Amino acid sequence: MTIIASTPMCANTPLLRVRDLRKEFKVRLGFGKAGVVSAVDGVSFSIAAGQTLGIVGESGCGKSTTARLLLGLLDADGGTVEFEGRELSWSNRLVRKRLRRSMQMVFQDPYSSLNPRMSIRENISFPMKVHGYRKQLRAERVATLLEQVGLHRNHASYFPHQLSGGQRQRVNIARALALEPQLVVCDEAVSALDKSIQAQVLNLLKDLQQQMQLTYLFISHDLNVVEYMSDRVVVMYLGQVVEICSSEELYRNPLHPYTRALLSAIPKLDPDVTTVPLPLVGEVPSPINPPSGCRFRTRCPHAMTVCGTERPALRGPAPDHAVACYLYEAGR
Amino acid sequence: MTTATTNSAGGAPGAETDIAAHSFLGEVVHRFVCQKMALGASGILIILILSAVAAPLLTQHDPLRGVVSQRLQPVGTPRHPLGTDEQGRDVFTRILYGGRISLATGIIPVCIAAVLGTAIGATAGYLGGWVAALLMRTMDMFYAFPALLLAIAISSSLGPGIKNAIIALSIVFIAPISRVALVATRQEVVKEYFEAARLSGANTPQLIVQQLLVNIFSTVFVYAAGLIGVSILAAAGLSFLGLGAKPPAPEWGYMLNALRGSLYVQPWVVAVPGLFIFAAAMAFNLLSDAINEALDIKSA
């Protein structure tokens, strides 16, 4: 049983609450043998309205799968998602269509996430067309959105291949905002861009959040980007949440050994500060056969016998800082 | 090639005069006419189609009745520029009138098969699972027969005549086109823009029609255009067996087979219908390549 130690920043119900989300994929391992990839295993967190929650972790830790479960692009094998206090059920088609207006996503690859045979205008207005906006309204909104994301309204008649990566990602953002959603999931939204463009797009996202009162779920493997964008951060490893806290706290006082190792690996700008990366032994274990108990124990420098018995619960030494590690269990 | 003079650094609004709006159609047409091959191929096809349509205006001979004493005149005879066939009919006239039949039996079955085949293949590719299995195994049943035999079988059960030949050929071509559409669909639905479109709340028909078809269109189009030449030849085969155009209809394939026996007497006259079939099929292939190039705006 996991306890959600992260409390929402405001007293109202959080905009999004995820409880114990689980997802498994079946894989074929060879002749007749089947394996199960535990991609997301008991993930829980919540996001308050207007906040940005960052999810950080290595490739393959289940961040993107979690996002897709949230948005209903994949069916969950267990757990619940509550949006504005009401539990989501993606099976009802009408409910699903209405929910699409509230939750949207900005994808990672700026090129393949736009239909190459449709103009920018058609790409952005597709969601509006689906929801029955009239042609005049669509054209106006496309122009408004393009200007909001820092492009020119005449870009509407261009095609994706005629724009640069940064411009395409702006178009992606414009499309995500077309239906005026409340929650926007940014799945590695800047990872495919040059550093200088990353900064511009991140600042654009921040500006838009203020202007439109958006809530972000910001997924990235880049700790610096996550720290810049997020109010609170969730650290994931091999499909499980290992730590949840505010982003300042994450940098000031990381608790979980995995988080510490991640942070110690970031190169620092100050040449006088020598960083000694904390060694992580071995490779990430295969998600088909994850280690028993705490999944990180095979690489953890502080592993104890108890770590192999049962999975540590996510609870906090502090009300808004939760960690899943036996080092911080009661008594230590 | 395009007038995209926007600055590339993340798109801060630059000088408004730099960013001009332009149209998709204008760009495609421009790219099309810049290819010399395209103009040549379109020229040939326009000539063939117009001459077939305007046949009565271009010649006064009767395509069906000939003067037997004038049979097998060589190419270049004063009143018969392309010679006469084995029954003394003017070959040029028969080519013109035959163009109507041959081009029709080339284009129409492919168009029908393209529409139906794409519908089947795209649905199977998108839905997957048992629907795809059901559809594609049904298509496999048609694949089991060699195309021409299948056309003959269908045609003979329907009876002779051009309309039945068109139906038979349409059925024959649906299966290969559906397979092309299936593969193209499978490649497109895993791309991120498709996921984004699904995220917009679109239902399956909207996704297939508005997002998918434009992307598989050129693949299917090029393949289908290549089938037009095959269709003309298949129609010729059917006519030879008495299942398509009935003699004395001046269908090009039928003419080719009827003149076959006179190959050693007037080789050039015998070659004429074959040359026209070749020209039509070649022109369609080049045209489809050119249109594919013009539509493929990505490679600007």
Image (spheres, rainbow, N blue to C red):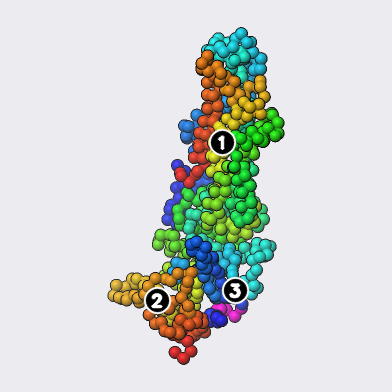
**Residues marked 3 and 2 touching at CB (< 8 Å):** no
Residue B148 visible (yes or no): yes
Q: Are marks 1 and 2 on the same chain?
A: no
Q: Position of residue A261 (x, y in %)?
A: 39, 76
Q: Disc 1 designates what residue? A: B227
Instruction: State the mark number for residue A79.
Output: 3
- Residue A160 located left or right of residue A178: left
How far apart marks 1 and 2 lie (CA) works out to 60 Å
- Is B190 above or below relative to B261? below
Secondary structure category for the residue under label 1? helix
Q: Disc 2 designates what residue? A: A299
Task: Count residues near mark 1 (Cα–Cα under 10 Å), then give few for <14, some for 14-19, many for 20+.
Answer: many
- Is B66 above or below relative to B32? above
Tag nearer the camera, 3 or 2 = 2
Q: Are marks 1 and 3 on the same chain?
A: no
Task: Count residues near mark 2 (Cα–Cα under 10 Å), then give few for <14, some for 14-19, many for 20+.
Answer: some
The residue that appears at 50% across and 36% down in the rendered structure is B290
Q: Which residues are magenta?
A: A8-12
Instruction: State the mark number for residue A81.
Output: none
The chain letter under disc 3 is A
Q: Main secondary structure of the magenta part?
A: loop
Residue type highlighted by circle 3: Gly
